[in-house]
Image (cartoon, rainbow, N blue to C red):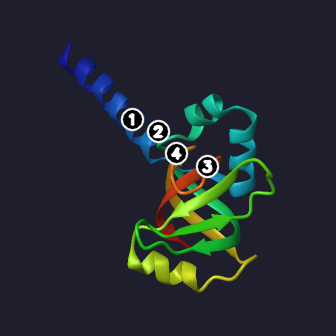
């Protein structure tokens, strides 16, 4: 019976690691579309999950009292997508990107979090590519 328990535990561990380590690939436009359609459904799918997001730079915002932000073009008049820059390396990369530049962001989706701008999706950036 102990072999059976070990196999079940191993399967559960592998399943857990696979689901936690799988990155969701999505564009900033698609993410904004999901949130503008149904926030709860989008949260169920993306909130606190690691994502690999592609998009184009719209603007860079520098703040004295908070983390700098990089906005991505979302083609959505209702919801914007902002990347929260957490390190000096990310800030240096983002500052040198011009409007319309293609970018790939790896990070954690915070959903429609309250921050500097309302009606916005926020991503905690892990890496800018």
Between the residue at mark 3 and the residue at mark 2, the CA separation in whole angstroms equals 31 Å
Between the residue at mark 4 and the residue at mark 2, the CA separation in whole angstroms equals 24 Å
Q: Earlier in the sequence, mark 3 or mark 4?
A: 4
Q: Which mark is residue 45?
A: none
Residue 45 rendering spot, x and y as whole percentages: 59, 36
Q: Which residue is mark 3?
A: 118
* Residue 94 or residue 65, whichever sits in front: 65
Determine which quarter of the picture holds residue 33.
top right
- Of labels 3 and 1, the one closer to you: 3
Which residue shows up at 81% across the image and 57% down it?
A: 75
Task: Count neighbours of disc 3 (C-alpha within 10 A) and say few if under 14, some if 14 to 19, many if 20 or more.
Answer: few
Between the residue at mark 1 and the residue at mark 2, the CA separation in whole angstroms equals 5 Å
Which residue shows up at 35% across the image and 28% down it?
A: 12
- Of labels 1 and 4, the one closer to you: 4
Q: Which mark is residue 113?
A: 4
Circles 4, 2 touching at the beta carbon (< 8 Å):
no
Task: Count neighbours of disc 1 (C-alpha within 10 A) and say few if under 14, some if 14 to 19, many if 20 or more.
Answer: few
Q: Which residue is mark 1?
A: 16
* Residue 78 or residue 17, whichever sits in front: 78
Q: Secondary structure at mark 1?
A: helix
Q: Secondary structure at mark 4?
A: loop
Task: Count neighbours of disc 4 (C-alpha within 10 A) and say few if under 14, some if 14 to 19, many if 20 or more.
Answer: some
Q: How many marks?
A: 4
Residue 5 rendering spot, x and y as whole percentages: 24, 19
Q: Is residue 41 above or below residue 66?
A: above
* Residue 10 or residue 79, whichever sits in front: 79
Q: Is residue 56 above or below residue 109?
A: below
Q: Which residue is mark 2?
A: 19
Which residue shows up at 60% across the image and 74% down it?
A: 60
Between the residue at mark 3 and the residue at mark 4, the CA separation in whole angstroms equals 8 Å
Q: Secondary structure at mark 3?
A: loop
Circles 1, 2 touching at the beta carbon (< 8 Å):
yes
């Amino acid at each position: 019976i102990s072999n059976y328990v070990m196999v079940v535990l191993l399967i559960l561990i592998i399943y857990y690691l696979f689901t936690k380590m799988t990155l969701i690939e999505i564009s900033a436009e698609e993410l904004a579309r999901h949130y503008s359609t149904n926030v709860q459904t989008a949260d169920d799918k993306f909130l606190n999950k690691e994502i690999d997001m592609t998009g184009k730079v719209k603007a860079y915002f520098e703040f004295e009292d908070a983390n700098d932000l990089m906005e991505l073009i979302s083609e959505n008049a209702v919801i914007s997508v902002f990347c929260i820059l957490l390190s000096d390396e990310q800030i240096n990369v983002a500052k040198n990107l011009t409007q319309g530049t293609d970018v790939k962001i790896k990070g954690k989706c915070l959903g429609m979090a309250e921050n500097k701008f309302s009606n916005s999706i926020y991503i905690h950036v892990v890496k800018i590519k």
